[in-house]
Image: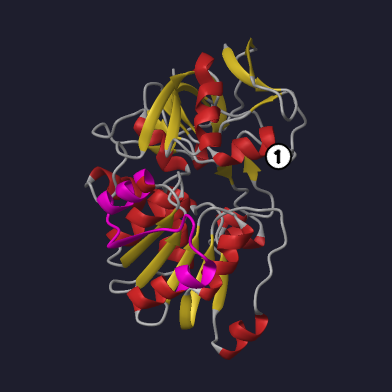
């Protein structure tokens, strides 16, 4: 099969012929229809973040496809089924899994990190972790449900616990942040979207943001004053979806007394937070990682009924041989979500 193989940081992925995976008894072999291109992939390629499996390896953790073959012990899938593959597989028996927090499983295995991923024609995955996709959902665009939709859903619904009428300020309207906006809006929140690109803010408006702020050229105090003016003193909830130390610091300052800062964006840098302000104003900070398996059926149903949109968010499609073009668009901030289609 063809695959885009990662050999080392700061080098483009190479399109190579590799062996098609052989499945075990509880696995399925999936013919990949599409796989989303994520900033996490870019962290490995551009920023030297190490993968658990040493290169050479296949990246890609946001796929959909058709079941090609099922293992001897698989009962819930058959060849020909449409399937969504989550980015993380859980063990099912550690303390966190037993508590229903499989997204932070102590023994988690991430596709395109611990094991070969889905920038390839086929991928083998545990059947227990996969989700059936309804026939009335677009197979290619549905790939982004795996991460770009599910991660915001978990952040909004489970970690930030957004309720109707909450004021929510979202820092960053990229591939994850734009879906934080639409999930928060679908949950009944009044959403303020903050970014430095007007076209992303325009999309945020289309997907439910009540207000938008272009932060380009604004001083921190000016930006915070504008947010406080729109929210009557500070947002109930701030969600940072970039992983930029400056916007992480701003997010904690953008919430009201008793407010919540939910951190979705990744950074390896230390970030200064005003501990006195946290204490005196009883501000909460919560991290958010991935999504629990139990939530995927709910997300898929929200997409099926039109409460969450896929097509506007998938801004570019590329063939496997064009994968470097997808990464270049991401580096320039010119895409929301690109997908590799097979």
Q: Quadrant of residue 117?
A: top right
**Residue 114 appears anywhere in the view:** no
Residue 39 position, x and y percent, is: 56, 40
The correct choice, above or below, for 330 with respect to 184 in the image is above
* Residue projecting furthest to the right: 54
Using the image as rendered, state which of residue 41 and residue 120 is in the foreground.
41
The correct choice, above or below, for 219 with respect to 7 in the image is below
Q: Residue at x 28, y 34 (%)?
A: 137
Dividing the image into 4 quarters, which one contains the N terminus? top right
Q: Quadrant of residue 43?
A: top right
Q: Which residues are magenta?
A: 199-224
SS for tag 1?
Answer: loop
Using the image as rendered, state which of residue 150 and residue 169 is in the foreground.
169
**Residue 303 appears anywhere in the view:** yes
Dividing the image into 4 quarters, which one contains the C terminus? top left
Q: Residue at x 53, y 61 (%)?
A: 100
Total labels: the figure holds: 1
The correct choice, above or below, for 153 with respect to 22 in the image is below
Q: Is residue 262 magenta?
A: no
Residue 313 position, x and y percent, is: 35, 40
- How many other residues sit within 10 Å of disc 1, few (<14), some (14-19) or many (≥20)? few
Residue 306 position, x and y percent, is: 22, 46
According to the image, what is the colour scheme of the structure? secondary structure
The correct choice, above or below, for 159 with respect to 320 in the image is below
Horizontally, residue 248 falls left or right of residue 62, namely right
Q: Is residue 208 magenta?
A: yes
Residue 192 position, x and y percent, is: 36, 64
Which residue lies under the disc numbered 1?
47
Using the image as rendered, state which of residue 192 and residue 305 is in the foreground.
192
Q: Quadrant of residue 105?
A: bottom right
């Amino acid at each position: 099969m063809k695959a885009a193989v990662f050999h080392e940081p700061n080098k483009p992925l190479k399109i190579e012929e590799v062996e098609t995976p052989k499945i075990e008894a509880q696995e399925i072999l999936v013919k990949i229809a599409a796989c989303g291109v994520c900033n996490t992939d870019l962290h490995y390629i551009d920023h030297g973040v190490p993968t658990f499996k040493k290169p050479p390896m296949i990246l890609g953790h946001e796929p959909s496809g058709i079941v090609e073959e099922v293992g001897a012990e698989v009962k819930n899938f058959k060849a020909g089924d449409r399937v969504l593959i989550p980015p993380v597989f859980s063990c099912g028996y550690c303390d966190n899994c037993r508590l229903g927090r499989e997204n932070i499983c102590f023994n988690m295995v991430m596709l395109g990190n611990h094991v070969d991923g889905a920038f390839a024609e086929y991928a083998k995955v545990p059947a227990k972790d996969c989700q059936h996709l309804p026939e009335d959902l677009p197979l290619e665009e549905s790939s982004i449900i795996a991460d770009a939709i599910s991660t915001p859903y978990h952040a909004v619904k489970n970690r930030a616990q957004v309720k109707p009428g909450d004021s929510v300020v979202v820092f960053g309207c990229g591939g994850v942040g734009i879906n934080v906006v639409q999930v928060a809006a679908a949950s009944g929140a009044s959403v303020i979207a903050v970014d430095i690109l007007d076209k992303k803010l325009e999309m945020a408006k289309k997907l439910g943001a009540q207000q938008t702020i272009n932060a380009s050229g604004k001083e921190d105090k000016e930006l915070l004053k504008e947010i406080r003016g729109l929210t009557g003193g500070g947002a109930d909830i701030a969600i940072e979806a970039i992983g930029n130390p400056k916007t992480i610091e701003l997010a904690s300052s953008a919430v009201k007394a008793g407010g919540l800062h939910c951190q979705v964006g990744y950074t390896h840098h230390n970030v200064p937070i005003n501990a006195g302000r946290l204490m005196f104003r009883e501000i909460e900070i919560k991290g958010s990682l991935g999504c629990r398996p139990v939530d995927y059926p709910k997300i898929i149903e929200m997409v099926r009924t039109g409460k969450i949109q896929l097509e506007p968010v998938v801004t570019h499609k590329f063939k496997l041989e064009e994968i470097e073009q997808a990464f270049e668009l991401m580096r320039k901030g010119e895409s929301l979500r690109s997908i590799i289609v097979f």
